[in-house]
Image (cartoon, grey):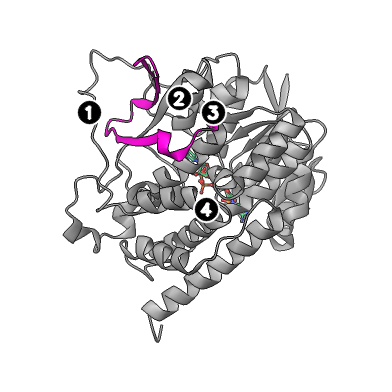
Amino acid sequence: MKTIAILGSTGSIGRSTLRIVSEHSGRFSVGALAAGRNWRLLAEQIREFRPRLAAVLDDEVARDLKVALGRGTPTDIVTGERGYGQAAALSDCQLVVSAMVGAAGLRPTLAALAAGKALALANKESLVIGGALVTRLAREKGVRILPVDSEHSAIFQCLEARASDVRRILLTASGGPFRTRPSAELAGVTPEEALRHPNWTMGAKITVDSATMMNKGLEMIEAKWLFDCDLDRIDVLIHPQSVVHSLVEYRDGSVMAQLAVPDMRIPIAYAMAYPERLETPARRLDLSAAPPLEFFSPDEERFPCLALGRQAGLTGGTMPAVLNAANEVAVDAFLGKRVGFMDIPRLIAGVMAKHRPADGSGLDEILEADIWARQAAAAWIDEANPGQ
Ligand SMILES: NC(=O)c1ccc[n+]([C@@H]2O[C@H](COP(=O)([O-])OP(=O)(O)OC[C@H]3O[C@@H](n4cnc5c(N)ncnc54)[C@H](OP(=O)(O)O)[C@@H]3O)[C@@H](O)[C@H]2O)c1
């Protein structure tokens, strides 16, 4: 029996992880759950999975959660950064699934590694902003990071050969809901349209990141750290059907790819049971009945976030933390209809241009850059919307 902690249990990845636990209840049990504000769903999860510990954002959420659970619940409720750290390091758990969204996932990810837990990593932002820290700690603790992102899971599965023989990594991208939208129309697209992803059902932030293609910008940096591969050997390939989840090209010309229907339960289950494979209820891939598989080069003029991601990754230091924070603020403002879709790359480029990157090898420096970038992004929005 493997006991797991799920950070971000109320989110899209967290809920899928719990579904896998239910389907394999003889193999997995839940030791800790951590969520943000959704105490209603967390209360249901606690009743069903009976973890020893549950962590939420603050005392107010904890109060509502305790009322919902009633007296006599065996689960300890803890709060804030300290509580997330406790959930990540709980002695009962062997595996931590890190699936919070955004920079908030960094500290709990580090706490899991510091405690020597096996780590199934969905929270790509912790590698984007703290890649050097996270990978150094994993090495020190002898922990292998198991990627949950479907593209990185695909690469991980294709990379069971010598890394020195790899010529390049090809990350596939669906192209999102605006893949074929002319540039003139992109400025006017609405949050509702951006949230309608053609292939995947995901949380709001990553769905908007897919629409702007910042998701691929973040994933290039994630892949650099996960697979110790220079950014000039990481390319993006548009593949609208989301069947080929990524590819690795070797120096002899061979290309390895991992294929499956787009269903996150497959990469999550692989990370949870690695190196074994579990039965999943995902639909089987029938290539003879599948639509033609298409591949295109990305259009970086219509989707400037891709180039911004690469630029931040190449600059390194604190620049990826700035890219990430500016993006989180910009996506939030877009969802709140305070800025337009094409303001997202404009805002990020504006904030990045003002940043003087520091080395970024320490947590304090990264968090300072994150706070600076959030303030710079808020100022950018105020300037763009005077009087609001
Ligand atoms: N969804 C996918 O298919 C997918 C695929 C690949 C990678 N990922 C990555 O996986 C991560 C999670 O994505 P998602 O789509 O599952 O996101 P989501 O549905 O928005 O869920 C986010 C989770 O994080 C929690 N959370 C949000 N802000 C928090 C904070 N400040 N402190 C603590 N917890 C907080 C939320 O809690 P409450 O809801 O309780 O507030 C929720 O449990 C992201 O890094 C994303 O890039 C997702």
Mark earlier in primary sequence (3, 4): 3
Query: How far apart in space, not on screen, are marks 2 and 1 (Cα)?
Result: 18 Å
Q: Position of residue 157 (x, y in %)?
A: 49, 20
Give the mark toward the camera: 2 or 4.
4
| Dot 1: element | loop
Circle 2 Cα neighbour tier, 10 Å, few/some/many (<14 / 14–19 / ≥20)? many
- Position of 103 with respect to 64 (left or right) is left
Task: State the quadrant of the C terminus.
Answer: bottom left
Residue range corresponding to the magenta coloring: 227-256
Q: Amino acid at mark 4?
A: Pro
| Dot 2: element | helix
As for residue 26 lying within the magenta part, the answer is no
Q: In this figure, which residue is indicated by the disc labeled 3?
A: 268
Q: Amino acid at mark 2?
A: Ala
Q: Amino acid at mark 3?
A: Ile
Q: Are marks 2 and 3 in contact (CB under 8 Å)?
A: no
